[in-house]
Image (cartoon, grey):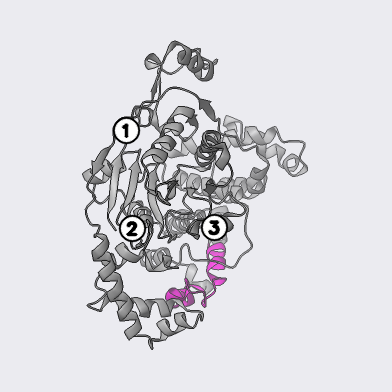
Amino acid sequence: MPPKAHSVPLKFQREGVKYNELSPEEQSEYEEKFWDEEAGGMPEKIESSALNNWLFNIDTVDKVLEYLMRYGVMVAGGDRLGKTIIFAKNHNHAMFIQERFDNSYPHLKGKFCRVIDNYETYAQDLIDNFYQKDGDPIISISVDMLDTGIDVPEIVNLVFFKLVRSKTKFHQMMGRGTRLCKGLFGPEIDKQEFYVFDYCQNFEFFAENPEGIESGSQESLSKKIFKQRLNLLLQLQNPDYPASDSEHRLRCGLEDTLHGEVAVMNPDNFIVRPHRRHLEKYAVREQWSKLSQEDTLEVTFHLAGLPVELPQEDETAKRFDLLLLNMQLALLEKSGSFERYRIKVMEIAERLEGKGTIPMVAQQMELILDLQTEGYWSGITLPMLEEVRVRLRDLIKFLDKGEAVIVYTDFTDTIGDHILIIVPGYASAEEMRQYWLKVEKFIRDHADHITINKLRMNRQITKQDLDELERLLFKSEEVGSRERFEKVFGHPDQIH
């Protein structure tokens, strides 16, 4: 299903908010909200990156919604906007969009336009209602939750109100509009295209950078900690390293910790199972006593980041673990980053001192005070840093979490004429319909295949079943390549 893509220029979204371009009344508001008492001044400009992050401007959002309601694809004989997803930057941005919609259309408040994200208690109920052809919400504001995996054929409008730099993610988001829908505009008047309104120059970016910027899978906090412990252990196991008795104890502790994580990995877990041979090798404690470079690579590639069956730990404690591990490695490597880590730990100690009425904090007050002195750091060692980690990690949760400052403004934004963008790689509705029919016939012809039969009988399927189904599909001439399949049906993991 081909998109009709509109690149819509918004001045603030592209250029930021410049003080000298505001009206006198708006300049007064700017001075009031952005004057910095400590600095004794204010910025000449608020960068565009602040928009929808911590700066929310009423007129900017109102213009986006007005544009959608005026130019979006309509259904029900042209009387109602068709199903729409607005891709928002964050939760606060999404809630602000909903608030502005409700303000402009009070008779539709609370039903027509809703935020669907992980903060919403009844998110699944809203998604189920969104699947209904004429059910509310009609506009779903998504913060990641609807970017992939939603398959609503009636979607005819997509609004990109955030930057996307991953090619994979961008095409997954575009895929929300590609589904065929028969009779959407009346008897035998099918959906032929969908509209995309882009306010963040995503199309221009991908025109210049066709492959996008792929960040890859983000490493979990647990995986980062595992890898840094492994790096530290490897250095301590170096035969040329003159380890003291306390450093030898640190080394043994690292070996025990890493071995302990691997030992509780469940070999029957479908994520762990492909690495079972490596798991069995390193589930033996002696294997950790002398790791080679090859062993380290093997453990990093096959075991780091796999799920472990251990009690869930506090995230703030784990972040402190990572900070101290990074600091230990910086000390070993005589890296300039050590000073940055030291200042961070001293700041944490200063904040903990202010929590001295908490008994757990009071018990560690001597160390907390020492950490704020230059003398403590003059002879710092790896074991001393390890002691800091162990004694303070469970106290970090008592620190106040700084709340982000959110500013709301009402400056007049400027919206320009849209530019139609030709988006390559999308088939026409008729081409998609023919392909759809070919795939349906292929599946009917292979109804006795074990996975297809399980799906027809509504029986549980395994990852191996899915792998076998993919092999069957993508080796066939009728289905063709995975890329072609996903353009019509979406990713196989997302098909409902």
* Res. 490 image quadrant: bottom left
Q: CA distance from mark 2 to mark 3?
A: 21 Å
Q: Is 260 inside the magenta-drawn segment?
A: yes
- N-terminal of the pair, mark 2 or mark 1, is 1
Front one among 141 and 269: 141
Q: Which residue type does callout 2 highlight? A: Lys
Q: Residue at x 43, y 49 (%)?
A: 84
- Is there CB contact under 8 Å for labels 3 and 1? no
Secondary-structure class at tag 1:
loop
Q: CA distance from mark 2 to mark 1?
A: 27 Å
Q: Is residue 166 above or below residue 152?
A: above
Image quadrant containing the N terminus: bottom left
Q: Which residue type does callout 3 highlight? A: Asn
Q: Is residue 406 above or below residue 137?
A: above
Residue 129 numbered mark, or none: 3
Where residue 311 appears, x then y in whole percent? 64, 62
Where residue 330 appears, x then y in whole percent? 45, 44
- Write down the residue under mark 2: 191
- N-terminal of the pair, mark 2 or mark 3, is 3
Residue 453 can be seen in this image: yes
Q: Residue at x 36, y 46 (%)?
A: 164
Q: Which residue type does callout 1 highlight? A: Pro
In magenta, the rendered stretch is 255-283
